Amino acid sequence: MRIDATLMGGLAEAAASAKDLEAAGYDGAWTAETAHDPFLPLVQAAADTSSIELGTSIAVAFARNPMLLANLSWDLQAFSKGRFVLGLGSQIKPHITKRFSMEWSSPAARMREMINAVRAIWDTWENGTKLDFRGDFYQHTLMTPFFTPNASDLAGFGVPKIFIAAVGNLMTEVAGETCDGVIVHGFTTERYIREVTIPALEKGREKAGKTMDGFQISGPLFVVTGNNEDEIKQAAQATKQQIAFYGSTPAYRPVLELHGWGEMQEELNLLSKAGDWVKMGEAIDDEILNTFAVVGEPEQIASELKRRYGDIVDRLGFYAPYKSDPGRWKPVLEELRS
């Protein structure tokens, strides 16, 4: 199992953060597209590290086009000497249309086509194939030598791996069909991965004539811990609020429904529209918390993560939506590797 971490800070802190994560023994450092661009910090990180994988988790796919993604990824793969992973996510319609002012329709079909278009562009650059991609959402039919990177840029390691974030069946099938890995949302459970995610991935792999061999399931999983009872209580409260926030989103309702909590999504959605964040967190009881998160003292965390996810997750990250001592994770990391 590979252990990943979030690359913290913006451009100024990216290099130091990546060096620290590499020195601590993490396998991957990932950026998220929140307040800052997710690609630029990885340039700094690549320049100051030599072995840790670097990826976006996630970059918003539909805020960009396939040519832009192909170009960014090609250059990061070349600069990092084969360590870049392109992690994409669809976001939700309001963000795409109102924040990014881009088109939204048929997200799973659009994502499939976007990834196929990126791969077609890479094939042109790497192998000299004529670019003639014609889809329902994207068309790429023009590429001249002046705009073509050198195939030697990626000699020895090839094009980047592509992961996409997925929760629902359709997007998860697309991940299995077109990608090298899937990023399961933090708002997931062991049962959901086993009963919903993996069967959908297998269906997608079968559609592409492939098996699950070599395919990676990446899980940023909720962890609640602390150095004493008060810290654990504070971590639990913060995590409950984060679970409630995700639970208010209609797209994530299937996870709640699997456990018989589907009606809670409507309740949480109404509270979110009213801005009652405290009450949202209070709606998450300890049973729900313990279903979504591994909760315990630091020495209990690794064994429970292994028990729940050891046979189903290939990459694991600690999703801790609260302030914590960075040194707390070192013994957990070491035990997970043992």
Image (spheres, rainbow, N blue to C red):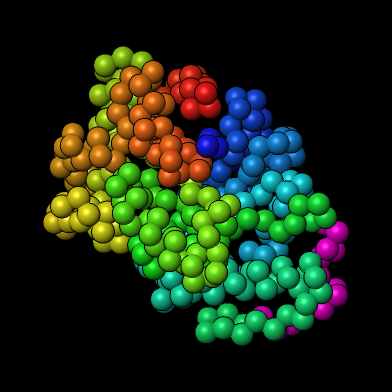
Tell me residue 139's x, y (percent): 62, 82
Query: In the rendered view, does 93 fall on the left or right side of 2?
Result: left
* 218 to 289, vertically: above or below: below
Residue visible at 71% across and 59% down in the picture: 159
The image quadrant of residue 27 is: top right
The magenta segment is: 140-153
Tell me residue 8's x, y (percent): 54, 36
Judge by depth and name the residue closer to the eye, 27 or 242.
27
Judge by depth and name the residue closer to the eye, 55 or 158.
158
Residue visible at 75% across and 39% down in the picture: 47
* 177 to 248, vertically: above or below: below
Judge by depth and name the residue closer to the eye, 32 or 310.
310
Tell me residue 233's x, y (percent): 25, 24
The image quadrant of residue 116 is: bottom right
Inspect this view and state whether residue 16 appears: no
Which residue is at the far top? 228
The image quadrant of residue 87 is: bottom right
